[in-house]
Every structure is written in structure tokens, then in C-alpha cells.
Image (spheres, helix red, strand yellow):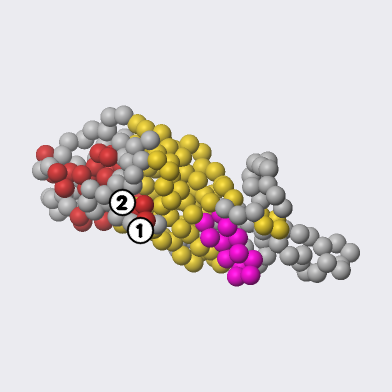
Amino acid sequence: HQLPGDVFMDMAVDILDISTIIAYTTAQILLTDNQLYNADVNHDSYVDILDVVMLVDCILNVNCDQLTRNIASGTAAGTLNIDQSHYLARSDEVNVISIDSEIPVRGLQMDVQYEPEEYEFSLIEQLDAASGLILEYNDDIPGLVKVVLYPEDMFEIPAGAQDILQLEFTGLERSTDGSMNLSLANTIVSGPNGIKIIMNESSHVAGEFRLHPAYPNPFNPVTPFSCTHLPVPTNREV
């Protein structure tokens, strides 16, 4: 059968449908063609966080039996950044993902990509600005963490610059430049009522500026020094 929002295929639109879409967006399950059709609530040919937010708002505010396919009107702009700090003594990388949006954020999904030969994913947690959203992730594939933040009520991440997630990685071997190669891909961000927030290209912003100890020792003919540095020329006292 075809009923917009009924992804669980039980002739109702409820939390089971939301959970099914989340499992699909985090690559835990596959959906049939009929499920994909019902899940594409905004009729943009994709099943993603925009559909989830529209379903949540539907369940909270209106009769979902009357849900019709439509794309939320309007878009907004925003930016995602990674603030990266390296702790040499513990071989840890702590990365804070921040968002700067023109409008409040109701949910987002993204792929966090890293080098599995050098680092091992250990932890992801919400920060205060995103504490009212539900966090789901899948790290089954080395080098990839699929992340979704979605609402269960009317909570929103406020507009403006906000730190939303913290990720931690354990170093498997010494990085050549003192910092890890971390990137965000396939990012989709939703505002209220499923409005798509267009993200500018994410950037890496160094959280600290450090000159690390010589390795292996300063008496070798050649000894490299690693330095965690700002990505653009900046005046600093050293």
C-alpha cells in the first residue's frame, strides 16, 4: 500500500516509521521500493532527515492520516566546522563539530570520515546546544561514522553559532603532522517543518596551537617536529 509516512507498513504513521527511516539513513537496514516511496514525505526523491523532521512535526501537531506529499517551502544557509585538538601524551584526537545557521536546526545527518589506519573511533556525544535531540550513529565501517540527530519533540538547536557534537578518536600510530585527516560528507540539515538548510563547505579550525616534542629524539641526523597549527596565517606569540 502507499501511505505517505507509513514506512513500517502497518497503515499508521508513528514513531515506528521514524525509527525505520533512522535505521535506513544510518545504513543499518534496506527499504523496499514501496517503503522508500512512503518514506519520501517531501517528495524530493530522497529519504533523509528532512522527511524525519516533517514526520515528527506531523505526529506532534496534525493528523498524520491527512499527511500529503510536499516539499517544505524556502531554504536557509549555514556552516559546519570541525574544531580539532591533539593530545600527544594520550594519542587522542578530540573534535568538536559546530554549526552556524540562519534559522533554528531541528535535525541533521552526516558522514564523518577519518583515516582508519591511523585512528580508531572511540566516542561521540552531544553537547549542550544539541542535548534535546536524539543521537544515532553507525560506526561498523572503518573510517566512517554515519551520524543522525533528530527530534522527538519541539526542541530546536538555536540559530547562530553552536557547538553540537564532540567526537573522540584514539591514535593507532603517530600522525605525520600532529593532526588527523577528518572530514564531513553527505551533510543534510533541517530547520523547522523540514526546511532544508544549505550548508557551506565544512572547514577545519584548529582548536589549539602547539609545537610538539621532537621524535624520536633530537640527536638523530634528522628529527621531525610536528606542529598543530592554524589553517590560515595568523599573528600569534610563541
Q: Residue at x 10, y 43 (%)?
A: 63
| Residue 162 included in the magenta stretch of the image | no
Specify whether 95 is left or right of 7.
right
Residue at mark 2: 150
Residue 77: quarter of image: top left
- Asked if one can make out residue 127 in the rendered structure from this viewpoint, the answer is yes
Frontmost residue, 10 versus 198 = 198
The number of callouts visible is 2
State the SS at label 2: strand
Residue at mark 1: 136
Q: Residue at x 17, y 44 (%)?
A: 58
Q: Residue at x 39, y 48 (%)?
A: 109
What's the CA distance linking mark 2 and mark 1? 8 Å
The answer to whether the residue labelled 2 contacts the one labelled 1, judged by CB atoms less than 8 Å apart, is: yes
| Residue 94 included in the magenta stretch of the image | yes
- Asked if one can make out residue 7 in the rendered structure from this viewpoint, the answer is no
Q: Residues within 10 Å of mark 2 (few under 14, many from 20)?
A: many
The spot of residue 93 in percent (x, y) is: 56, 61
Residue 132: quarter of image: bottom left
The spot of residue 208 in percent (x, y) is: 60, 54
In the image as oriented, which residue stretches furthest toward the right?
Answer: 221
Secondary structure of the magenta portion, mostly? strand
Q: Earlier in the sequence, mark 2 or mark 1?
A: 1
Q: Is residue 16 above or below residue 190?
A: below
Q: Which label is found at residue 179?
A: none
In the image as oriented, which residue stretches furthest toward the front?
Answer: 237
The spot of residue 217 in percent (x, y) is: 80, 69
Name the kind of residue labelled 1 in the image: Glu
Q: Residue at x 43, y 43 (%)?
A: 161
Q: Range of the magenta residues?
A: 84-95
Placement of the N terminus among the 4 image quadrants: top left
